[in-house]
Image (spheres, rainbow, N blue to C red):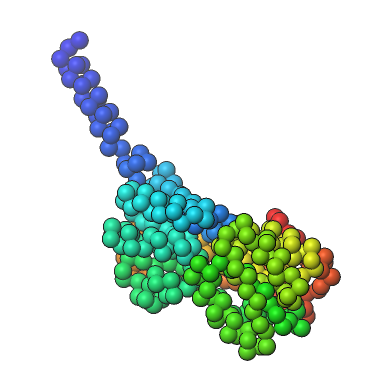
């Protein structure tokens, strides 16, 4: 073999080695988007689906232009703490926390590591101490709130149950999002002559038992965007249906699982909106350019089989505002 040929072979091998170890298209050389949520339920899953789809529309495709890492704490804060350590060690370009609890656990470590934290599906980010105000997002934290005023919920519930005096409320008191929303809702409910009867759901496994404990004491049941209860929506809805009591929720996925009705945000759109913020951060923009937003479209969603089983009808006042579904889709 001539020296020229041997030199060419060495050069080709060197080029291959350089390409192999420094190829920008290799997944571990891509910017990391780390996503976590506190528990599995369809509402948060839908937000995550919208987030991934939205990132793809923005040109951030998993395995090609970014590497997406996802972890679920399955309702366990100890696991969530482990996920936090893992994410910080990975030094991602951005962390996305789906749910208040996930965002709260990640906030301080992310700030200390100077990693932007984007939250989504957080009901009250101010009460959760994620941001000092909707417009103050210069500390590396911002996102999408799913806060909804109490009035639309109560207007819907009383339209269906005009005789409502006692409303059974299922929630986990350790979830700041639930506590903040229910405080404002209870004040408005009391002004309407409605009393809250609270059912504390500390874990998803307790949801059915707590639901049964409210039977005979209330005229209707309701749960807000409470991750613990939403994860058990199907079992809560089954018990309510068996006992001929209307169950209202705050999300469309719970209605698909059997709740009678909800004023709900479009969760896919919420995920896509979250992706817009994440894409901006990936392009090098600071969180200060993105105030917290909650201007996502909402709608009244009604489960018609549940409505029929309860021998109820859609109130005339809501007739032109309702989206009907036939249960699980």
Q: Residue at left 64%, top 61%?
A: 207
Does residue 98 appear left or right of residue 253 in this picture? left
**Which residue occupies the foreground of this view, 114 or 53?**
114
Q: Residue at left 40%, top 61%?
A: 105
Res. 192 image quadrant: bottom right
| Residue 123 image point, x, y percent | 50, 71
Q: Residue at left 67%, top 74%?
A: 168
| Residue 28 image point, x, y percent | 34, 41
Q: How many labels does the image show?
A: 0
Look at the image and tell me whether residue 18 can be seen: yes
| Residue 185 image point, x, y percent | 58, 80
**Outermost top residue:** 1
**Outermost right residue:** 311
**Which residue occupies the foreground of this view, 180 or 265?**
180
Q: Quadrant of the C terminus?
A: bottom right
Location of residue 245 with respect to 23 vertically, above or below: below
Does residue 201 appear left or right of residue 130 in this picture? right
**Which residue occupies the foreground of this view, 107 or 294?**
107
**Which residue occupies the foreground of this view, 166 or 62?**
166
Location of residue 8 with respect to 181 vertically, above or below: above
Res. 263 image quadrant: bottom right
Q: Residue at left 20%, top 16%?
A: 5
Q: In which quarter of the image is the N terminus?
A: top left
Does residue 151 appear left or right of residue 50 in this picture? right
| Residue 273 image point, x, y percent | 48, 64
Look at the image and tell me whether residue 323 can be seen: no
Location of residue 151 with respect to 242 vertically, above or below: below
Res. 305 image quadrant: bottom right
Location of residue 278 with respect to 32 vertically, above or below: below
């Amino acid at each position: 073999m001539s020296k020229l040929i041997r030199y060419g072979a060495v050069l080709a091998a060197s080029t291959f080695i350089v390409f192999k170890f420094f190829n920008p298209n290799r997944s571990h050389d891509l910017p990391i988007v780390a996503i976590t949520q506190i528990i599995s339920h369809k509402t948060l899953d839908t937000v995550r689906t919208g987030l991934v789809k939205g990132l793809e529309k923005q040109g951030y495709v998993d395995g090609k232009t970014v590497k997406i890492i996802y972890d679920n704490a399955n309702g366990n804060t100890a696991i969530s703490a482990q996920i936090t350590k893992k994410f910080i060690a990975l030094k991602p370009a951005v962390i996305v926390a789906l749910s208040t609890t996930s965002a709260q656990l990640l906030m301080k470590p992310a700030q200390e590591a100077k990693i932007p934290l984007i939250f989504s599906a957080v009901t009250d980010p101010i009460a959760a101490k994620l941001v000092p105000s909707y417009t103050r997002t210069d500390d590396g934290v911002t996102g999408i709130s799913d806060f909804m005023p109490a009035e639309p919920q109560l207007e819907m519930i009383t339209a269906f149950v005009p005789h409502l005096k006692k409303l059974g409320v299922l929630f986990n008191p350790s979830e700041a999002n639930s506590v903040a929303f229910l405080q404002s809702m209870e004040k408005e409910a009391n002004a309407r002559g409605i009393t809250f009867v609270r059912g504390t759901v500390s874990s998803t496994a307790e949801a059915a038992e707590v639901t049964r404990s409210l039977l005979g004491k209330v005229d209707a049941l309701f749960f807000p965007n409470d991750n613990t209860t939403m994860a058990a929506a199907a079992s809560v809805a089954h018990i309510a249906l068996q006992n001929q009591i209307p169950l209202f929720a705050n999300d469309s996925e719970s209605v698909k699982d059997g709740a009678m009705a909800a004023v709900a945000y479009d969760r896919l759109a919420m995920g896509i909106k979250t992706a817009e913020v994440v894409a901006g951060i990936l392009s090098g923009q600071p969180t200060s350019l993105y105030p917290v937003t909650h201007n996502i479209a909402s709608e009244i969603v009604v489960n018609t089989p549940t409505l029929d089983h309860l021998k109820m009808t859609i109130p005339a006042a809501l007739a032109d505002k309702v989206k009907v579904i036939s249960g699980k889709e």
